[in-house]
Image (cartoon, rainbow, N blue to C red):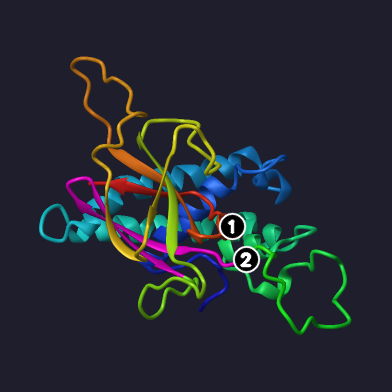
Amino acid sequence: MPGSTNIPRSIKGYNTFINVTTPYLITGVPQKYLQFGWTAANLSFWQGQQTSWNLLYPSYLNKKGTYTTDIKNDLRNIIKSTIAYDKTNKLILKVKATAGLTSLNCSNFNIPEVYAEPATGAHPMTKTKIADKTIITEELVYPEIKPIGGGMLHIKAYCEKKQSGRPHKPEGYDELEYAIGVFYSTATGLPVSPDDARLTKDYSSKSNFKLLTSAITANLTAIAAGSATPLKEAVIFFRWAKSKHPTLDGPWSVAFTTPIL
């Protein structure tokens, strides 16, 4: 990635970045932002950037309707302000310097894998010639989620973060499992785990499919008479799954948050 920041400069790249890192910061005990040495003010800024972004991004995607050059420029300004704030507060550098940095930390914040510390603290002296089929894989899902109107989301799931080539499942997996909930953009305390009771779990046999969200209404609270209805957004977790061997399913992703048109 060019430049001195790990924050993507492209609109598509930043959309994935801000919607992956923001919910991730409040996972864990203690929460990740505290582990990284961020302050509450740093977290609040990051969450504000995501909120501002997700209010504009649906209009940017609607090329035949609400899209304007001003909206595109506003999105680019959000990217610039995030980069400037990061450079001033050295947030990504603090993540890099975190003791016990994991591969998932690195992946979410676009940090080279070499910064991750081995889980055992030492490299194995020998290699096993035959793979142990009882070990759960570490294959992660890297989704591209695009709202396309009518409550529909177009989902393309990849095995690599760069999302190159055609969407596809890893070898040995026949399903993509997801846990999804729909909330108003004004909601707080959004799910940080795929096991949250507010989420609905389902499967797709395809890695490139359209997901209709209009029937997922359990978390949409009543709106006071005369009040404007807030925008809706989906919170989604993904993992690769094996229908015949569910104990060998892959690990869940972090939460992905996307607006709904």
Residue 97 in the figure: left or right of residue 223: right
* Nearer the observer, 199 or 234: 199
Q: Mainly helix, strand or loop, the magenta region?
A: strand
Kind of element beneath mark 1: loop
Kind of element beneath mark 2: loop
Counting from the top left corner in percent of width and height, residue 254 is at: 54, 52
Per the model, the C-alpha gap separating discs 1 and 2 is 6 Å
Q: At label 1, which amino acid type do we have? A: Pro
User: Residue most toward the left?
Assistant: 64
Query: Which residues fall within the magenta stretch?
Result: 137-158
Examine the rendered structure and indicate whether residue 232 appears above or below residue 208: above
* Nearer the observer, 108 or 204: 204
Q: In terms of image quadrants, where is residue 235?
A: top left
The answer to whether the residues at label 1 and label 2 have Cβ atoms under 8 Å apart is yes
Q: Which mark is residue 210?
A: none
| Circle 2 Cα neighbour tier, 10 Å, few/some/many (<14 / 14–19 / ≥20) | few
Residue drawn at (49%, 49%) of the image: 255
Counting from the top left corner in percent of width and height, residue 251 is at: 59, 57
* Nearer the observer, 230 or 91: 230
Examine the rendered structure and indicate whether residue 196 appears above or below residue 138: above
- Residue that badge 1 annotates: 251
- Residue that badge 2 annotates: 138
